[in-house]
C-alpha cells in the first residue's frame, strides 16, 4: 500500500501541473491532463489508505461528469453548426451586411441558441460534478485533518455555480491554488486518531 508521504508527492505534483497547464502555450493541455491523472491517482491512493471507497468514487464521478460535459458541449455545437448550414453558412458570412438586429439574428440566432443550450447542459453537469468533488474532498479533510481540502471542495462548488456569470472561472482558479496548498499540507502519516479508527474498522 502506498504511504501517505508518497501520495502527498503525487498529489502536489499533479495539482501543480493542473494549475500551471493553463498558462503554458501549446503543451499546456497535455501538462494539465497529466496533472489531472496524477491527482486522480493520489485520491484513489488516499481512498485505499483510509479504507473509504466513497472518496475515490465521488471524485471519479466528478471526473467523468467533467469529461461528459465537454463532450456534450462539443456535440451540441456540432449539431448546431450542421443545422444552420455548416460550411455553406460560414461561406455566406463573407457577404453578410448587418444593418440591424433582425439581420444579425437571421444569421447568428440559430448558432447562438445552440451555444446557449450547450453551455446550460455543460453547466448543469459541471455543478453536479462539483457536488461530488466536494463530498470527496470533505472526506479527505476528515481523514487527514487537513481542512484546506474542505475549503477546496466548497470553493470549487461555488465556482461551478457561478461560471454561468463568468466570475466562477476566477473562483475556480482560486480553488486550484487552494488545492495545491492542500496537497502540500498533507502530513507524511495519517493522524493517530484516524489510524485507531481504521484499525477498529478492520478488527
Image (cartoon, rainbow, N blue to C red):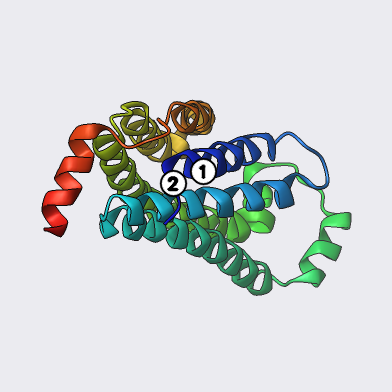
Q: Which of the 4 image quarters holds residue 114?
A: bottom right
Query: Picture coordinates of residue 160 (x, y %)?
Result: 41, 40
Task: Name the residue: 31% across, 52% down.
Answer: 55
Residue 173 in sight: yes
- Residue placed under numbered mark 1 in the picture: 6
Horizontally, residue 118 falls left or right of residue 152, namely right
Q: Which of the 4 image quarters holds residue 58?
A: bottom left
Q: Residues within 10 Å of mark 2 (few under 14, many from 20)?
A: few
Residue 128 in sight: no
Of residues 9 and 96, the one nearer the viewer is 9
Horizontally, residue 16 falls left or right of residue 50, namely right
Q: Secondary structure at mark 2?
A: loop
- Residue placed under numbered mark 2 in the picture: 3
Q: Which of the 4 image quarters holds residue 94?
A: bottom right
Which corner quadrant holds the C terminus? bottom left
Of residues 179 and 119, the one nearer the viewer is 179
Task: Name the residue: 26% across, 55% down.
Answer: 51
Q: CA distance from mark 1 to mark 2?
A: 5 Å
Amino acid at each position: 500500500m502506498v504511504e501517505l508521504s508518497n501520495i502527498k508527492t503525487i498529489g502536489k505534483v499533479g495539482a501543480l501541473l493542473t494549475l500551471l497547464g493553463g498558462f503554458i502555450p501549446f503543451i499546456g493541455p497535455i501538462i494539465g491532463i497529466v496533472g489531472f491523472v496524477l491527482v486522480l491517482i493520489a485520491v484513489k491512493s488516499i481512498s485505499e489508505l483510509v479504507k473509504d471507497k466513497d472518496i475515490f468514487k465521488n471524485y471519479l464521478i466528478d471526473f467523468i461528469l467533467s469529461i461528459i460535459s465537454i463532450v456534450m458541449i462539443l456535440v451540441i455545437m456540432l449539431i448546431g453548426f450542421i443545422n444552420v448550414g455548416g460550411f455553406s453558412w460560414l461561406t455566406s458570412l463573407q457577404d453578410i451586411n448587418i444593418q440591424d438586429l433582425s439581420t444579425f439574428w437571421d444569421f447568428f440566432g440559430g448558432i447562438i441558441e445552440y451555444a446557449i443550450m450547450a453551455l446550460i447542459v455543460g453547466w448543469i453537469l459541471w455543478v453536479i460534478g462539483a457536488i461530488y468533488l466536494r463530498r470527496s474532498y470533505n472526506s479527505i479533510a476528515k481523514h487527514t485533518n487537513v481542512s484546506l481540502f474542505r475549503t477546496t471542495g466548497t470553493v470549487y462548488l461555488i465556482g461551478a455555480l457561478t461560471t454561468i456569470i463568468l466570475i466562477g472561472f476566477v473562483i475556480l482558479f482560486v480553488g486550484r491554488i487552494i488545492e495545491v496548498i492542500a496537497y502540500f499540507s498533507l502530513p507524511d502519516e495519517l493522524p493517530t486518531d484516524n489510524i485507531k479508527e481504521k484499525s477498529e474498522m478492520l478488527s
